[in-house]
Image: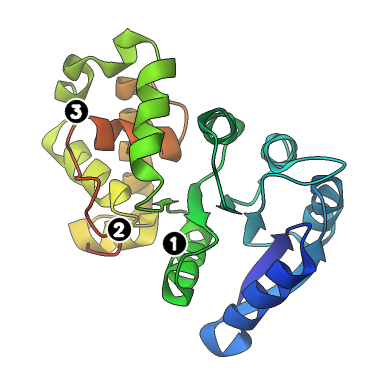
Amino acid sequence: MIRVVLVDDQPIVRAGVGRILGHEDGFEIVAECGDGREALTAVSEHRPDVVLMDIRMPVMDGVEATREISRLADPPPVLVLTTFDEDDVLWGAIEAGVSGFLLKDASADDLIAATSAVAAGGAWFDRSVAPRVLEAYRGRVAPANRERQRLEQLTERENAVLRLMARGAANQEISQALHVSEATVKSHIGAIFAKLGVRDRAAAIVFAFDHGVVAIGEDPREH
């Protein structure tokens, strides 16, 4: 079972997500929270595989909650589930360390796929969000981080890892696709972060989108 902490201040949203992420599809909702502060307590208590996080909530919003979760030892990945309407909020969440974005009007299949991908160590960007991710990235990241030369530093194998990572593949899936160990995959990912000048998986994927490694319209489930 993929153990999920669900964070949203609207009970009707939590109920709807709970119906979709059921035991029959391999999920267990171990805690439901109405704000970010409750989420911190739930994460510490239940040690989930993934956190589904709303952004706009009372007491503590999703960006601040994600930032606090990322400071924990062995933090779970965070998938933002939101109506999303502001670039500042989007980029703030990326900087806080989220692993992906899914809009609340997404299909049940996409919710299941995104939650599974992020729980397995992958990342997910809703197709509707990806262009705005790039807009925020281009407006906020130093020009040096956009230089094509950074991408050209990658080896052929590192490029292959980046392409798979940008399509939503988790480390285990990458190791199977390239016929290497997961330890080797982790080593390649560390090298990719260093060469691209990024600090995490989400930022590397945005970089890949921005430089045409993977097309924005490409289905993240197509490996």
Residue designated by label 3: 154
Between circles 3 and 2, the one closer to the viewer is 2
Residue designated by label 2: 220
Q: Earlier in the sequence, mark 3 or mark 2?
A: 3
The residue positioned 63% from the left and 73% from the top of the image is 17
Q: CA distance from mark 3 to mark 1?
A: 24 Å
**Residue 88 location (% of width, % of height):** 56, 27
Amino acid of disc 1 = Ala
Amino acid of disc 3 = Leu
Q: Are marks 1 and 2 in contact (CB under 8 Å)?
A: yes
Amino acid of disc 2 = Pro
Residue in front for this viewpoint, 132 or 72: 132
Q: Indicate the quadrant where residue 8 lies.
A: bottom right
Residue in front for this viewpoint, 177 or 180: 177
Look at the image and tell me in which quarter the N terminus lies.
bottom right
Look at the image and tell me in which quarter the C terminus lies.
bottom left
Q: Is residue 217 left or right of residue 59?
A: left
